[in-house]
Image (cartoon, rainbow, N blue to C red):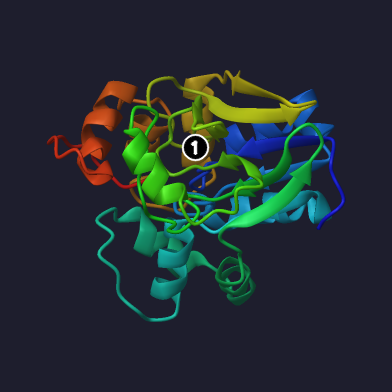
Amino acid sequence: MSEPVRTVAVLSDVHGVLPVLDAVLAEPDVAGADRVVVTGDHAAGPQPVEVLDRLRSLGDRALLVRGNADRELVTLARGGTTAVPDPVTPWAAARLRPADVDLLAGLPHPAELTVEGFGRVVFCHGTPRDDDEVVLVDSSLDRWGEVLGGLDPSVTTVVMGHTHMPFVRLVDRRLCLNPGSVGMPYGRAGGSWALLRAGQVELRHTPVDVEAAVAAVVAGSAYPAAEEWAREYVTSVNSDADALRAFAPRDGRGRAGSVSGSA
């Protein structure tokens, strides 16, 4: 059992967007946190190498969890194929250095910390059992029970990413939360994150100058469609309602919908 930590800042789904990541990392409660956990999908975006270098600079304070996009980047970088529809993903995979590929290939999923006021906390991307599985704030208790059923009863809290929408809810006495997305937010532009401190969860949001962030992505990326990509995702063109409609069929309820790109 690891030694308890007092404060944990949780980020997720940076998707290769450096200016918003930098804005979140500059927040006093992130800079001062004992640990910074990033729950997957770090580099599949227009600034993959730059984001990985920034995350490396956090040193041992950072705990990076594998997301589905991280796994897909490794597959592509090593010559494999995936069904990923977003063209930025193969472009990002081709930009990775060997050390980047090794870093992403070695990331854990799920990961666990003991946090003061919470006890055992599991950090994952989709769900603890599958980095690409979808569960939503309004998923049924049966669905939640299915995806969390393999956890030890002593795990009090589950932190996940993948769907880019922040929420906190109880699931049969277990606290479940999603910090939202740093680089591809649905519903509100800016960087969403969460703080675990003294047994309390605080959902946080870091506002950014959206036009300046788009310009910084374009200036800092060689991706040919960087401006188009940034104007869709950094500005949060897709709303949370769009995203819920798109993801809903993947949690078993069968409603149709679509959001361009991939989580």
Secondary structure beneath dot 1 equals loop
Q: Is residue 252 visible?
A: yes
Q: Residues within 10 Å of mark 1 (few under 14, many from 20)?
A: many
- Kindly give the residue lying farthest to the right in the view shown: 3
Give the side of residue 52 with respect to residue 73, left or right. Answer: right
Instruction: Say above or below: 184 vs 70.
Output: above
Residue matched to label 1? 183
On the image, the x and y values in percent for residue 136 come to: 37, 34
Residue 214 vs residue 179: left or right? left
Q: Residue sitting at 57 percent across and 18 percent down?
A: 207
Residue furthest bottom in the image: 79
Considering depth in this image, is 171 or 262 the residue closer to the camera? 171
- Residue at the image position 78 percent from the left and 31 percent from the top: 117
Residue 259 appearing in the image: no
Q: Amino acid at mark 1?
A: Gly
Q: Residue at x 14, y 35 (%)?
A: 255
